[in-house]
Image: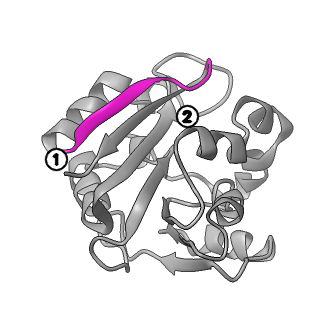
Amino acid sequence: MGKKFDPKNAFRLHDERRKKLLPPEETLISLGLREGMNFIDVGCGSGYFTLPASKIVGKNGKVYAIDVQQEMLEILKQNGVPENVVILLAKSDYDFPIEDETGDFTLCAFVLHENKDPIRFLEEVKRITKTGGKIVILDWKKQVEEWGPPYEERLSQEEVIKFCKDVKLSIHKYGELNPSHYKVICVKE
């Protein structure tokens, strides 16, 4: 497993290459985020998905932006936080300050590979997601690339699917998101 993203590199999270490959608003809509939902962004970082999600869910929805790094949350705050966004500092990767069964749609974008204990992490993600809610994991393909985490820190899609099954999540859909990333979409039953 990898190490945490260095906040000094937060500017890379919003570069044009990434926006072209992974347009945040289009990506969230294609994954099923809708108006009025409670959206949880686990490992929100500087808000790449948080801010577009707040527009999509609108005033009848709520966005919970969770991260373990205070520095990343400070960067998010500097970007301006809409009224429907709640920013939460997690005590650890396995202890989120949010009620059980809160999220209709919980996103774990590019954070699972950073966890030393992915099963424990997914159990906490499952806890905060409503029964019938969607858990979406986006991560780097297990391939050598000039950007992203080193090859040895990446998780294969098959490993992620196994972790999800180990915590009794129902696999709804999985596959390529773009040439560098994959998606695993689960439902909490």
Left/right placement of residue 138 relative to residue 10 reads: left
Mark 2 secondary-structure assignment: loop
Q: Which residue is mark 1?
A: 167
Marked residue nearer the N-terminal end (1 or 2): 2
**How far apart are the two marked residues, 1 and 2, measured between alpha carbons?**
25 Å
Q: Dividing the picture into quarters, in which one does residue 102 lie?
A: bottom left
The magenta stretch is 168-179
Answer above or below: position of 133 versus 185: below
Left/right placement of residue 82 relative to residue 62 reads: right
Rendered location of residue 28, percent (x, y):
60, 46
Q: Out of 127 and 180, give the one closest to the viewer.
A: 127
Q: Is residue 170 magenta?
A: yes
Q: Which residue is mark 2?
A: 149
User: What is the residue that sits farthest to the right in this orientation?
Assistant: 16
Q: Which mark is residue 184?
A: none
Q: Residue at x 70, y 41 (%)?
A: 26
